Amino acid sequence: MTRVAAIDCGTNSIRLLVADADPATGELTDLDRRMTIVRLGQGVDRTGRLAPEALERTFAACREYAEVIKEHGAERLRFVATSASRDAENRDDFVRGVLDILGVEPEVISGDQEAEFSFTGATRELAGRDHLDKPYLVVDIGGGSTEFVVGDDRVRAARSVDVGCVRMTERHLVRDGAVTDPPTEEQVAAMRADIEAALDLAGETVPLREARTLVGLAGSVTTVSAIAQELPEYDSAAIHHSRISHDRVREITDWLLRSTHAERAAVPSMHPGRVDVIGAGALVLLAIMERTGAREVVVSEHDILDGIAWSVA
């Protein structure tokens, strides 16, 4: 048994997992799992740089996580940074800040590496569960990018494309510095065109229609599941391995793209940091289901963070 810590720093959120890993049994026992919305990717698509206020929000979360890691006595830590820090001109500022706070250098991994970690984290516990057929298509809808991975017991093909809930919102739904409330039909159409082009790219590498089970990861997908179940609050146990039909995803996406900020914020399971970007994230999920012909998506709370933890163990 090895006590490990894993940090996943994405475009919209930074997450920590401290867990006991038993490679012999394949069990990962959570000791602490938490998430903070830091919006590290704020403005990166437009400026190419990490904003000073976004860096400070991220460093504040890192200081909190350093205390948690110390309290639990984790033996090893791995910090993985994804889309926003991969794209930024000033990513060295980010690297130095993390190193000073946590004592490890963040690994700015490639999209392909990101996809492999996501696949491992999402599928390691699915074998033999509820008649879920292989191969799996794992889709990790992040803030700046979406990863597509097809595999059985191991990855067969993977591709990362630059569509995510934050990137699509900032690119298409922001006017005069504010998110359109609600977006216009023209804005949604332009966003949809971008997503379809990205799916064309993903399909060049990943056989999207060969998969028998679609597995959806990350905050956009888990939030759609919470809405579908009409949960009174965000409940990881209820969301993990829930299934949402294509028709239900379409209903929810249509509502999110017609709703106002106040209406979305009133959803009891909605994290405040997702209110403005959830419509774009849901549209990415819907487009994937339509392209692949998936009748349902299996939602997983275990994702790249768990894959990172296993890589440390």
Image (cartoon, helix red, strand yellow):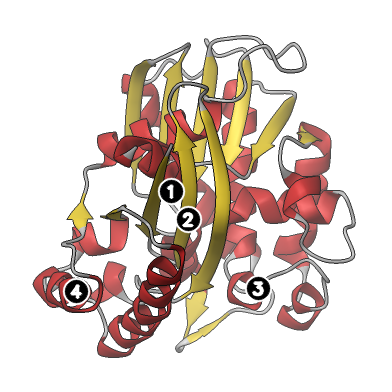
At horizontal 41% and vertical 50% (from top left) the residue drawn is: 163
User: Percent from the top left, x then y, of residue 281?
Assistant: 58, 54
Q: Earlier along the polypeptide chain: callout 3 or callout 1?
A: 1
Q: Earlier along the polypeptide chain: callout 1 or callout 2?
A: 2
At horizontal 84% and vertical 49% (from top left) the residue drawn is: 228
Q: Which residue is mark 4?
A: 94
Residue 89 versus residue 119 in the image, above or below: below
**Residue type, numbered disc 4:** Phe
User: Percent from the top left, x then y, of residue 219?
Assistant: 59, 56
**Residue type, numbered disc 2:** Leu
In this rendering, which labeled residue sits more in front, label 2 or label 4? 2
Q: Dot 4 lies on which element? A: helix
Relative to 186, 166 lies left or right = left
Q: Earlier along the polypeptide chain: callout 3 or callout 2?
A: 2
Quadrant assignment for the C terminus: top left
User: Percent from the top left, x then y, of residue 188?
Assistant: 59, 58
- Tell me if mark 3 has few (under 14), some (14-19) or many (20+) residues whose alpha carbon lies within 10 angstroms of its own: some
Q: Earlier along the polypeptide chain: callout 4 or callout 1?
A: 4
**Residue type, numbered disc 1:** Asp
Distance from disc 3 to disc 2, alpha carbons, whole Å, reads: 24 Å
**Residue type, numbered disc 3:** Val
**Based on the displayed image, in which of its 4 quarters is residue 115 positioned?**
top left
Q: Dot 1 lies on which element? A: helix
Q: Which residue is mark 2?
A: 17
